[in-house]
Image: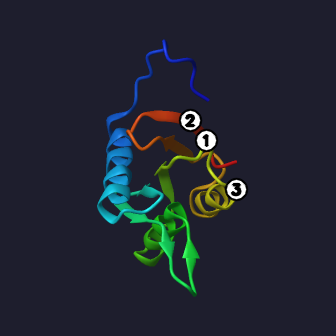
Amino acid sequence: MLGGMSDIVEIDPEDKKIITLARSARARNGVPEGAAVRDETGRTYVAGTVALESLRLSALQTAVAMAVASGAKSLEAAAVVTEAGEPAEVDLAAVRDLGGAGTPVLLAGPDGALRLSVGAR
């Protein structure tokens, strides 16, 4: 978890990139959440919330599914931009299934500011 507002938090440039991509997906599609994941080769997959009558997926579940469908074998990191205060357990489970329990999940607010970084545990 991140410290107070007076703490300076250095974010890896590649992690900042996936936060920016997630934020862009959220804004562009007008959805509650945007997400991005980076696979073991450095490729990124970006998605928004899917809310169809017959299919409901969080943005992070969708991004993980896109990675799997594209042949990713593992994840290096995941990011979600949301109003929520913490990642949902189903999101952590999706990241954990592909990337393992130690995969970092970055949670940022709609302004793109990193609020929380946790392992997919």
Name the one closer to the observer, 51 or 77.
51
Give the labeled residue for mark 1: 85
Q: Secondary structure at mark 1?
A: loop
Residue type, numbered disc 3: Glu
Give the x, y percent position of residue 12: 38, 33
Q: Residue at x 51, y 81 (%)?
A: 52
Confirm whether residue 8 shows in the render: yes
**Which residue is at the far top?**
6
Give the x, y percent position of residue 37: 44, 56
Tell us which disc is closer to us: 2 or 1. Answer: 1
Q: Secondary structure at mark 2?
A: strand
Q: Quarter-wise, where is residue 41 in the image?
A: bottom left
Q: Secondary structure at mark 3?
A: helix
Give the labeled residue for mark 3: 89
Give the x, y percent position of residue 72: 45, 68
Residue type, numbered disc 2: Leu
Q: Residue at x 51, y 42 (%)?
A: 106
Give the labeled residue for mark 2: 116
Residue type, numbered disc 1: Gly
